Image (tube, rainbow, N blue to C red):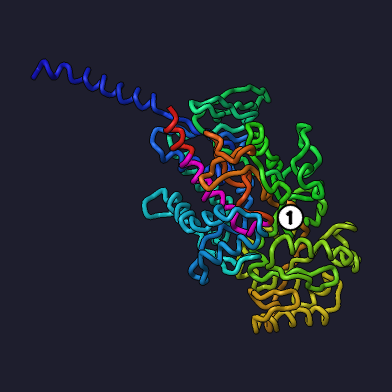
Amino acid sequence: MKILSLFIPFIAYFVYNYIFLSNMAHQKTVVIVGGGLAGLSAAIEAHKVPNVNVIIVEKEKNIGGNSMKATSGINAIEPRDGDTRDDFIQDTLKSGAGICREELVTKLVDESREALDWLVAESEFEEGKPTLDLSVLSRCGGHSHARTHRCPSQNGRPVPVGWKLVDTLKKRFCSFSDGRVITHARVLRLLTSINSKGEKSVTGVEVIKKNPETGEETREEITADAVILTSGGFGGQTGQYIPDGTPSLLGEFAPQLLNTATTNGPWASGDGVRLGLAVGAGIRDMDQVQVHPTGFIDPNGPTDPTKFLAPEALRGHGGVLLNGEGHRFTDELTLRDIVSSHINKQLSTTHKHTNSFMGKTVPKKYAAAYLVLPQATVEDYGESTLGFYASKGFFKKVDGIDGLAELLEVDSSQLKNEFEEYDSFGSTNQPDQYGKTFYPCPLTSEKPSQYWVALVTPVVHYTMGGLEMNSNASILTGENGKAIPGLYGAGEVTGGVHGHNRLAGNSLLECVVYGRTAGRNAALYSQSEQ
């Protein structure tokens, strides 16, 4: 026994090294290009597959991207409002105007409730204590039911849903001891090789990393067993050229929108689309660019090229749109492209009243509308949340219809008649002259109350087109529609889910559903490659 005990440490040492080295030999790497909600969802799911290293490559100094800006919420089938799977699918297909890929939409809807449950579960850093609350519900434009979820205020302070989702998943990924994030690193190209089947497969990325302190740039090749593109769309560069002199994708595919204001950050320049094209990926619906009807006009910089979004949920809770003459002109809750078109048609009213809030703020030939929120809408949406926008100077508060009429420089009796007519339709739930059938709250009140008023304009918001993918989140070739081995994608970099027009709340949902799918399938693919 004494002799055997002498050998035990050596046996343990060799067993440990055998297991450790064996695991090292089987370790696989998945690289994710882009650190927004889709990228983080992919990273967490890929990490759950054993023996997979996950690396997020992000060109900005922080991860988050445009996902951080999302404010209306994330969709899921909501039984509380009588919602059904078929209703959700049909709303999405109708908005897509016949060019969605139905199998992608079906997957999006079928996994929507699971996506919300997963997000809440990932926020549970202490057992039984989730830190994510998505209990606030809105019915947004184009939806037949209230199914768009966002976060309630906490301690009187707003909790933007996009920021909260990204922050939650960032904390989860960074809690992994082997999770790696490389910032200030732009991917120059995808590395490829010919696999055992004679196919071109993606085997890594070449990046250029910038030292934020010295500005020094270095190139590096990162070998990977699979790559996931989650780098977003191309709505952040609305000029003819992007900063490096390359023609913008917006200029190539939607030139009518050049120099239109945008809600996107400048990082949304179509990098992932170009990376995919360079290895033979197909693209679709690139001319389908969503113009959101309500970007806030800052009175201190009315023509600023980047706008804060006035969330669709503001109209979902009862906000209405008025033209420069103080008249409604649209169903505020119809599809985004229709509302945007109707605002553009009100151009002749912008300067009808030169001393009005609009007339004194908005340049000539600049499309604009008033977004008017009655006090009931303010309270229902959350006054503390609206306080953030008020602090930016976007809202003016006025007392009653007389105060509103003075701000708009219109007759108060005209405005009163306008609002009472609206309320008469709302009391019977009958369609008004614009086809509106859902009236979240009345515009008039027997008690003295305030109105919150902002100026809004249509803005480039989302690019529905992108790389071709299938329901497994594999990126497909443009030549024959087959999956490119080792290449996956999710989020705005891909096309096919939204078609002609995206519904509010479906972008964050797409990021989670297809991000998780891409992460899981990329990790499994990596293990199948020897």
Chief SS of the magenta region:
helix
Whether 179 is among the magenta residues is: no
- Location of the N terminus by quadrant is top left
The image position of residue 221, as x and y in percent, is 57, 23
Let me know if residue 98 appears in the view: yes
- Looking at the rendered structure, the kind of residue marked 1 is Val
Along the line of sight, the residue nearer the viewer: 429 or 124: 429
> Residue at (68%, 35%) from the top-left corner?
274
The image position of residue 317, as x and y in percent, is 63, 69
78 to 199, vertically: above or below: below
Along the line of sight, the residue nearer the viewer: 119 or 436: 436
- Location of the C terminus by quadrant is top left
Q: In the drawing, does residue 123 fall left or right of residue 148?
A: left
* Residue 291, quarter of the rendered image: bottom right
Let me know if residue 509 appears in the view: no
The image position of residue 143, as x and y in percent, is 61, 66
Count of all numbered marks drawn on residues in the image: 1
Along the line of sight, the residue nearer the viewer: 308 or 267: 267
Q: In the drawing, does residue 357 fall left or right of residue 270?
A: right
> Residue at (66%, 32%) from the top-left corner?
278
* Residue 24, quarter of the rendered image: top left
State which region is magenta.
Answer: 501-521
92 to 374, vertically: above or below: above
Q: Which residue is mark 1?
A: 291
Name the residue furthest left.
Answer: 1
The image position of residue 283, as x and y in percent, is 66, 42
Instruction: Indicate the secondary structure of the residue bearing disc 1.
Output: strand
Q: Residues within 10 Å of mark 1 (few under 14, many from 20)?
A: many
Whether 517 is among the magenta residues is: yes
* Residue 20, quarter of the rendered image: top left
> Residue at (77%, 77%) from the top-left corner?
401
